[in-house]
Amino acid sequence: MYSVLVVEPIHEKGIELLKKETEVAVGNINADIQVFFERYIEKADAIITRGLFPVNKDLIEKGKNLKVIGVHGAGYNHIDVHSATSRRILVVNTPGITAEAVAEHVLGLMLALTKRIAYADRRLRSESSPTQDEPEMSP
């Protein structure tokens, strides 16, 4: 059976799917990640990371069974790709996976800016009454 290190927590349904086919060790974001790696890296066949902790040359060299490093997200600048590929370890990611969420966020920020939502919120929370010198809340 394959062994997978999930460095940072992912959705529990993803963990459940992995557990059906592999042995899974899930890191704790509040714990010492180096201790986690030291404990599990030697027998790991795969690493799944979200990018909070570097997967460097030393770690890759300790992973005697490593076959793949997967990024749960788009970027992979926290992985020593050169070291991984020199050991014939695949590095994979999910480019474009956050495109829709980013677009929605940008539209939300544009609306907030246009309608001056932050200004209105601060004004309401301060309970101050408007003065003639203050601009209108909406254009």
Image (cartoon, grey):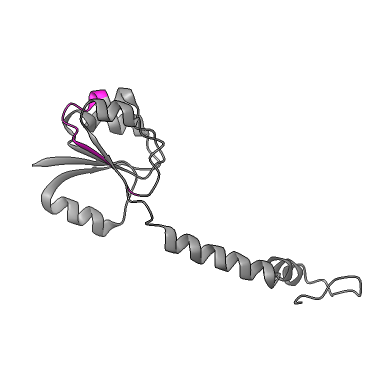
Task: Looking at the picture, tell me which residue is in the foreground, 139 or 8.
Answer: 139
Left or right: residue 9 versus residue 127 is: left
What percent of the width, then of the height, locates residue 44? 19, 34
Asked whether 67 falls inside the magenta stretch, the response is yes
Residue drawn at 12 percent across, 41 percent down: 2
Compare residues 72 and 128 and report the one nearer the observer: 72
Q: Position of residue 19 (x, y in %)?
A: 16, 51
Q: Which is more toward the observer, 82 or 45?
A: 82
Total labels drawn: 0
The part of the chain drawn in magenta is 61-72
Name the image quarter holding residue 113: bottom right
* Residue 78 point in image, percent of width and height: 40, 35
- Quarter occupied by residue 28: top left
Q: Quarter of the image containing the C terminus?
A: bottom right
Residue drawn 36% across the image and 45% down it: 50
Residue at the (26%, 30%) spot, across then down: 85
Whether residue 29 appears in magenta in the rendering, the answer is no
Quarter of the picture containing the N terminus is top left
Q: Where is residue 94? Give x, y as percent.
A: 33, 51
